[in-house]
Amino acid sequence: MRRALLAITGLAASTTALVVFKGSPGATQVAQNLPTAQPVNPTPQDVDPGTGPTADPVAGAPTPSVAPSAPASAKPSKSTARPPGSPRATTKAPTAPRTTTKAPQSTTRRVTGPGVDNEYGFVQVQIVVSGNRIVDAVSLSLPSGGESDIHSDDVSSRYDGTGGEVVQKQSANVNTVSGATETSNSYKQSLRGAIEQAF
Amino acid sequence: MPTATIRPGLCRVEQIMGTAITVDLADDLPPATLRELADEVFAWMREVDARFSTYRPDSEVSRFDRGEVLLSEASAPLRFVLEACADLWGATDGFFDAYATGRLDPSGFVKGWAAQIASDRLLAAGAANHCVNAGGDVRVRGCAPTGAPWRVGIRHPWDAMATCLVLTGTDLAVATSGVYERGRHVLDPRRGAPASGLRSVTVVGPDLGVADAYATAALAMGAAGLGWLNGLDGHTHAVVTDDGRQFHSTGLPVTD
């Protein structure tokens, strides 16, 4: 019963998303709030698939990649009906983030790795190659799972802290980085696939 | 083989516990002393891995889980960790659950706890300025090699190469739990299903093992985790929700 309900609302949500996107491509409210996708980082940077957060690379270069909402994989059946303009809806747009992150230089090319399923969802990695160097690796899709039931309005009344704003990227110098542990095997598989295709 | 350094101390990374462990010693000690201190840290981390790894069938945790080791026969570290996990289960309303996956897996506490002990030992050995980073769980003390207090970035949940906040301090334990890389590996122990609502939870406090467990618990609580963190004494937090919003306690030592 619950599953059926989810499926129906999911269908409704995805349909809404499609309609909304057709009507005003990339012009949803949240998409504007999010840090916009930047052009490909011109600074050559080796991609190291084995390591997670390392200290210094963060310092100089917030790498482009897609906008924060993009990795959310399109999984309409799992999300509940939501108002148009929600991040999930915007991530349905298959082309918008990618076209905006297109490299300004003609020498770079993008190679997309195979989609790899794991128990949490679908993982797909795209690499940006400039000459013989990988200058960026972007997750086109990462597992994102369930719906968010947090609304900043609900939270603020009883919350002593600050916030509610859209998460920003900082490029400050740091000595070290705190983050959750490490890359999944699916990510490595997709990355390896992209590298094999590229070279 | 002395190398020319422009900074005092020593920084070394090793791959242990399926993750990268970094030890950054900022004290201007003799090179041999620094190497010895780093060696001791990594030896300790390998010892913890051998004992607590759930991936090794011969680890004490795995043997205990299969009933081949009784509690009365367990080593002192294992008994300590089991007791700590039981305490944390109570302190988190059951949301930190070392049995959430159906088998004993105290990893959500062990990594931070091991790094905390490594840091305690470095301090006791006279290396008062150091950073131990165990797969994203960070314990810093004193100052960085720059001479200024440590600057600890919190990883941006949607961009592995960017940070979303920078913390600074001379005595911080910073643990982050997130669902961005391994997928939803944190289970809500009450439903047995992946947690949702929060994308990344960072907890800052005096003890890295506890901070790690609290971050894992809050992530498993989903949306309710924010209110729970808000009421925690002696700890501050930063949270990013699934829909890309950021919240943090006013006492969080944030810097530009």
Image (tube, coloured by chain):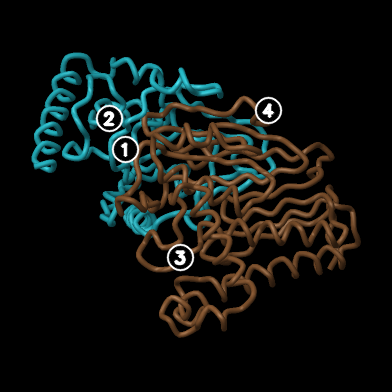
Chain colours: A cyan, B brown
Residue B42 at x, y percent in the picture: 68, 68
- The reply to whether callout 2 and callout 1 are in contact (CB within 8 Å) is yes
Q: Earlier in the sequence, mark 2 or mark 1?
A: 1
Tell which subunit mark 1 falls on. A
Label 3 in the same subunit as label 4: yes
Per the model, the C-alpha gap separating discs 3 and 1 is: 28 Å
In the rendered image, the vertical position of residue A150 relative to residue B52, given as above or below: above
Within 10 Å of disc 2 (Cα), the crowding (few <14, some 14-19, many 20+) is many
Numbered label tally = 4
Secondary structure under tag 4 reads strand
Residue B219 at x, y percent in the picture: 44, 43
Residue B111 at x, y percent in the picture: 58, 60
Q: Earlier in the sequence, mark 3 or mark 4?
A: 3
The residue type indicated by label 2 comes to Arg
- Residue A60 appears in which quarter of the rendering? top right
Residue A88 - label:
2
The residue type indicated by label 1 comes to Ala
Disc 3 versus disc 2: nearer the observer: 3
- Which residue is located at x 54 percent, y 66 percent? B82
In this orientation, which residue lies closer to the viewer: B35 or A96? B35
Quarter of the rendering occupied by the C terminus of chain B = top right
